[in-house]
Image: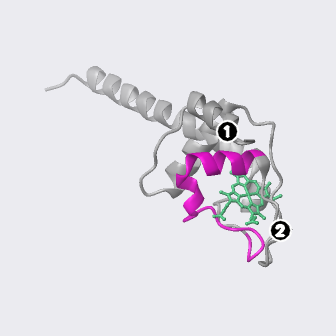
Amino acid sequence: MIPKSKFFLVLVLLFAMISCDNQTYKQGRLVYERNCMNCHMEHGEGFQNLIPALKDSKILDNDQELICLIRNGIDTKDSEEKVQPMPGNDKLTPTALSNLINYLRHEYDIKPTVLLPKEVEHYLNDCNK
Ligand code: HEC
């Protein structure tokens, strides 16, 4: 039989592991709340036909397109749909972007893949070409 104190220690360790694992998503959630939630809403559901939902967005899977979209925004001048333009955001560092994207994929992607800050940096360099 496992002594009680050991059992407790295992519980504490397990808890620490779980909270550690969530840390990156927590950071990403914060970036989301500060930069995206005003428009895309609390659970990424979007708003009527003005703001698209992030859930089920095909762009989430596309590293290059997603990163440039967040950096440069979307200009809808020529669009016939009734959506608004999305402003760009040049304040987010590669680390913030990586946390944000990993969070979004964790929430809304069936098969989330992870992006490292280094990879984000590489994609950012290709945005304005
Ligand atoms: C001022 C409001 C606003 C903010 C802030 C905003 N967005 Fe958007 N976003 C929009 C609108 C409007 C569109 C649709 C533009 C279009 O399609 O022409 C859009 C489109 C998108 C799309 C494409 C969805 C699809 O499948 O068509 C993604 C992904 C996205 N936004 C992510 C983000 C992320 C991540 C952030 C935070 C860094 C963010 N947005 C901040 C308004 C906003």
Q: Give coordinates of residue 86: x percent, y percent.
A: 80, 58
The quadrant in which residue 93 appears is top right
Q: Give coordinates of residue 76: x percent, y percent.
A: 82, 66
Name the residue type under label 2.
Gln
Query: Please, what secondary structure does the residue beneath circle 2 have?
Result: loop
Q: Give coordinates of residue 43: x percent, y percent.
A: 63, 60
Residue that carries the numbered disc 2 in the rendered image? 84
Ligand 1 contact, mark 2 (Cβ < 8 Å): yes
Q: Give coordinates of residue 71: x percent, y percent.
A: 75, 44
Tell me, for residue 92, which label it has, or none: none
Q: Is residue 42 left or right of residue 34?
A: left
Asked if 57 appears above or below 27 in the picture, the reply is below
Residue at x-position 78% and y-position 53%: 73
Count the numbered circles shown.
2
How many residues crowd mark 1 within 10 Å: few (<14), some (14–19), many (20+)?
few
Q: Label 2 to label 1, Cα distance in Å?
A: 25 Å
Q: Is residue 123 left or right of residue 22?
A: right
* Region rendered in magenta: 47-71
Q: How is the image coloured?
A: one colour
Residue at x-position 52% and y-position 53%: 61
For the N terminus, the image quarter is: top left
In front: 122, or 82?
122
Residue that carries the numbered disc 1 in the rendered image? 126
Residue 124 visible at all: yes
Query: Please, what secondary structure does the residue beneath circle 1 have?
Result: loop
In front: 22, or 67?
67
